[in-house]
Image: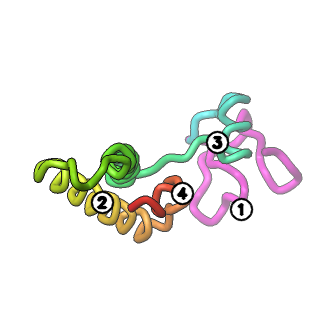
Amino acid sequence: MTDSTCVPRSTASAPTATSVPAGCYPSTTPAMTAADIAAHKFGSHVRVSPEVQRAVTRFEVAALRVVELAGLDARGMSAAQFDSLALAQDTMVEARLVLERAGLLHLIDASALAVA
């Protein structure tokens, strides 16, 4: 981003913490490609911690298991299937709590919560 307050990357000297205007990048930051800039602008690339990635994956897998088991007739389910259903529901709740603490509930499909 280049404007009257930003120094172009090619001519920027090493900035101090107070010399870089808001919205400008220090000269030590590698240049972003056009695709990176577009992804950043439209928020299509979200970097999250491994804990959040794990929570999203666990939630999605558990939601699939809940849907699979919830469709069965309860009278025909084995004890292992009941345990698996309870575990999947507990996993969804735990994963949701991790995402809620991180403020990233939008990463999971809210319609899956109605099943659990």
Circle on res. 53: none
Task: Classify the position of the N terminus by image quarter.
Answer: top right
Q: Which mark sits nearer the N-terminus, 1 or 2?
A: 1
Rounded to the nearest angstrom, the CA distance separating label 3 from label 1 is 22 Å
Q: Residue at x 21, y 57 (%)?
A: 87
Judged left or right of residue 54, residue 114 is right
Residue 106 magenta-highlighted:
no
Rounded to the nearest angstrom, the CA distance separating label 4 from label 2 is 14 Å
Residue designated by label 1? 22
Task: Classify the position of the C terminus by image quarter.
Answer: bottom left
Q: Residues within 10 Å of mark 2 (few under 14, many from 20)?
A: many
Please provide the residue range marked out in magenta.
1-28
- Which of 48 and 18 lies nearest the eye of the viewer? 48
- Which of 71 and 26 lies nearest the eye of the viewer? 71
Residue designated by label 3? 44
Residue 53 visible in this rendered orientation of the protein: no
Residue type at the position of mark 4: Ser
Residue 85 pos. (x, y %) = 25, 54
Q: Which mark sits nearer the N-terminus, 3 or 1?
A: 1
Q: Residue at x 19, y 55 (%)?
A: 82
Element under disc 1? loop
Element under disc 3? loop
Q: Which mark sits nearer the N-terminus, 2 or 3?
A: 3
Circle on res. 111: 4
Rounded to the nearest angstrom, the CA distance separating label 3 from label 4 is 21 Å
Residue type at the position of mark 1: Ala
Depth check, mark 4 against mark 1: the one in front is 4
